[in-house]
Image (tube, rainbow, N blue to C red):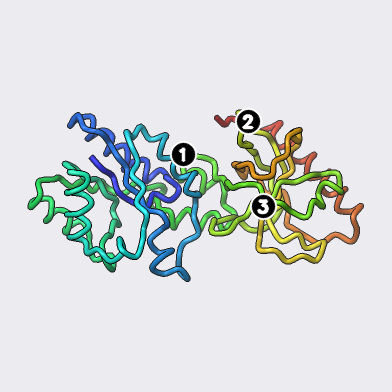
């Protein structure tokens, strides 16, 4: 039993599809395996139009691991794989290598060279090779299909609560801490810097967030600046700078951090001097403490 798709975000629509695969696998007494691709096919075929990701690869794997699957097959999407026709993909990957008995796909699934393969292609080849095809109805919320595209739009608009509701988990940005200017330390508020390259993100601004640092089991309240650091005249590509309300003793450089964005505090802006910036950061911290006093963290 395989379920195949990009599964970016592993949102409630994906979760619904995967639950069908798990149920059918149990009925047939076979393993349930998800098949996904890395990178996203459009990142190879149309890099200028590739979608910003809802999850990093490690995030997608982590979310898929929570879906009661028996396994995950990660296919490297290469030019060779991209050139396989839909029929060749079925015969070489699904039939010869995996010997599938049942496949579950989403409402908009396309595959094979040029995306020419679709549900009718699978059903026709299933009759030839002896496997079944299921295409469950798309999951909906408020009458509209739950999709990665819909969720990306909500995040870009800053509608984080609505995006999280469709995801089925709080929206988060994850990455490995990179060296920065170390200016936050001199201001009295050390920060950990995460790249946003390739990831969808909300509008620039300052947010109340929760952070989970690699090697720790507890989520911690933090303040995050998502933006360009304009006060110091630097025009970076947007990045996420987080200040833990209870900084850790060990260095964060090189460690992975997951950051869940809960509440937007204010716009990013230029301050007239260092003292004004320090006062504003202190106010941001106070507001963040107040936010989490009224909204206690309930995360794993």
* Crowd tier of the residue under label 3, counting other residues whose Cα lies within 10 Å: few below 14, some 14–19, many 20 or above: many
Q: Which residue is mark 1?
A: 62
Q: Residue at x 80, y 66 (%)?
A: 233
Residue count near mark 1 (Cα–Cα under 10 Å), binned few <14, some 14–19, many ≥20: few
Q: Quadrant of residue 103?
A: top left
Camera-side mark, 2 or 3: 2
What residue is at 50 percent from the left and 49 percent from the top? 56
Residue tagged by mark 3?
240
How far apart are the two marked residues, 2 and 1, measured between alpha carbons?
A: 16 Å
User: Of the residues under marks 3 and 1, which one precedes in the sequence?
Assistant: 1
**Mark before the other along the chain sequence, 2 or 3:** 2
Name the element at disc 3: strand
Q: Total of numbered circles in the picture?
A: 3
Residue 161, position as x, y percentages in the image: 56, 45
Asked if residue 59 lies left or right of residue 147, the reply is right
Say left or right for 288 vs 145.
right
- Determine the CA span between mark 3 and mark 1: 21 Å
Task: Give the residue drawn at x 33%, y 51%.
Answer: 5
Mark 1 secondary-structure assignment = helix
Place residue 181 in its image quadrant: bottom right
The residue at the point 52 percent across, 47 percent down is: 162
Q: Position of residue 151 (x, y in %)?
A: 48, 53
Compared to residue 171, the image places residue 245 above or below, namely: above
The numbered dot on residue 216 is: 2
């Amino acid at each position: 039993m395989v379920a195949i798709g990009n599964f970016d975000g592993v949102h409630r629509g994906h979760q619904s599809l995967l639950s069908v695969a798990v149920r059918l696998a149990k009925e047939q007494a076979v393993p349930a395996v998800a098949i996904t691709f890395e990178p996203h096919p459009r990142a190879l075929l149309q890099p200028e139009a590739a979608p910003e990701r809802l999850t990093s690869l490690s995030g997608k794997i982590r979310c898929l691991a929570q879906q009661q699957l028996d396994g995950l097959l990660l296919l490297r999407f290469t030019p060779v794989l991209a050139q396989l026709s839909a029929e060749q993909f079925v015969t070489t990957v699904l039939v010869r290598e995996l010997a599938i008995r049942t496949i579950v796909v989403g409402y908009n699934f396309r595959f094979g060279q040029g995306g020419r393969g679709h549900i009718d292609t699978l059903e026709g080849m299933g009759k030839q090779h002896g496997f079944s095809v299921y295409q469950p109805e798309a999951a909906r919320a408020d009458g509209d299909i739950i999709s990665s595209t819909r969720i990306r739009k909500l995040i870009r608009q800053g509608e984080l609560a609505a995006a999280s509701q469709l995801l089925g988990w709080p929206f988060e940005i994850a990455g490995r801490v990179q060296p920065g200017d170390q200016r936050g330390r001199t201001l009295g508020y050390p920060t950990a810097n995460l790249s946003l390259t390739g990831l969808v993100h909300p509008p620039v601004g300052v947010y109340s967030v929760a952070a989970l640092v690699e090697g720790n089991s507890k989520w911690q309240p933090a303040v995050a600046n998502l933006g360009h650091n304009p006060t110091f005249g630097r025009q970076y590509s947007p990045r996420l700078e987080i200040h833990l309300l209870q900084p850790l003793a060990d260095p964060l450089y090189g460690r992975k951090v997951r950051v869940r964005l809960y509440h937007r505090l204010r716009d990013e802006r230029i301050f007239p001097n260092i003292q004004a910036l320090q006062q504003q950061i202190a106010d941001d911290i106070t507001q963040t403490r107040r936010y989490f006093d009224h909204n206690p963290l309930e995360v794993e």
